[in-house]
Image: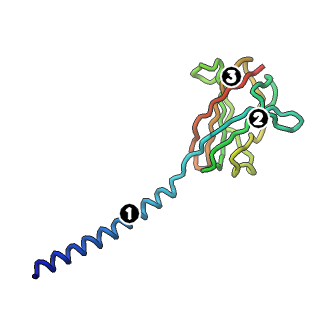
């Protein structure tokens, strides 16, 4: 009889210990997951001409012309701090020909999923079909994916 009570007693202690142990580790895991912030993810980039203080989307730009990019990121972490732009000509090139950045983003645009560069850039380089690559960095220094797109410079 005594053995049976001892076994029941030990089973209860083990069950209670496991229950509290699991819930404690579950809470710790939840805290870790909540503090782990995903990096931004660029979903679209458009090159834009600036005509009469308006942004006009265009896949072709003139050399020496001032322009900008409209960058769209996912809405999980849109607090973008810096922007990097690299241009490749020829498109197949492994090494970028030009690089802009890190460029700052307007403060009022940090909470939006689409934003423009703070200051327009002047497109330089040789005429041709360029491959541009855009990457952003958030306030936690997380780098996004590299988004690539084509722009023809005249």
Pick the residue in front: 87 or 1. Answer: 1
Mark nearer the N terminus (2 vs 3): 2
Q: CA distance from mark 2 to mark 3?
A: 15 Å
Could you say whether the residue bearing mark 2 is in a helix, strand or loop? strand
Residue with the mark numbered 3:
130
Task: Determine which quarter of the picture holds residue 46.
Answer: top right
Residue 47, position in %: x, y? 74, 32
| Neighbours of disc 2 within 10 Å: few (<14), some (14-19), many (20+) | many
| Neighbours of disc 3 within 10 Å: few (<14), some (14-19), many (20+) | many
Q: What is the number of the mark on residue 5?
A: none
At 65% from the left edge and 50% from the top edge, which residue is drawn?
79
Residue with the mark numbered 2:
68
Residue 70, position in %: x, y? 73, 38
At 57% from the left edge and 41% from the top edge, which residue is drawn?
143
- In this picture, is 63 found above or below 35? above
Q: Are marks 2 and 3 in contact (CB under 8 Å)?
A: no
Could you say whether the residue bearing mark 3 is in a helix, strand or loop? strand
Residue 106, position in %: x, y? 74, 46
Q: What is the number of the mark on residue 25?
A: 1
Task: Determine which quarter of the picture holds residue 54.
Answer: top right
Pick the residue in front: 115 or 98. Answer: 115
The figure's colour scheme reads: rainbow
Mark nearer the N terminus (3 vs 1): 1
At 13% from the left edge and 78% from the top edge, which residue is drawn?
4
At 76% from the left edge and 42% from the top edge, which residue is drawn?
118
- In this picture, is 10 found above or below 141? below
- In this picture, is 71 found above or below 92? below
Q: Report whether 68 appears left or right of 140.
A: right
């Amino acid at each position: 009889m005594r053995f049976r009570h001892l076994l029941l007693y030990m089973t209860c202690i083990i069950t209670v210990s496991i229950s509290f142990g699991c819930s404690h580790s579950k809470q710790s895991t939840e805290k870790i997951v909540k503090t782990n912030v995903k990096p931004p993810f660029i979903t679209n980039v458009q090159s834009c001409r600036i005509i009469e203080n308006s942004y006009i989307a265009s896949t072709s730009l003139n050399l020496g012309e001032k322009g900008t990019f409209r960058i769209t990121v996912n809405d999980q972490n849109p607090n973008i701090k810096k922007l990097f732009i690299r241009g490749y000509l020829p498109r197949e090139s492994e090494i970028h020909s030009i690089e802009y950045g890190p460029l700052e983003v307007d403060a009022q645009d940090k909470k939006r999923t689409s934003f423009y560069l703070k200051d327009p850039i002047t497109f330089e380089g040789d005429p041709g079909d360029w491959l541009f690559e855009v990457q952003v960095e958030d306030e936690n220094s997380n780098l996004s994916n590299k988004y690539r797109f084509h722009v023809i410079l005249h």
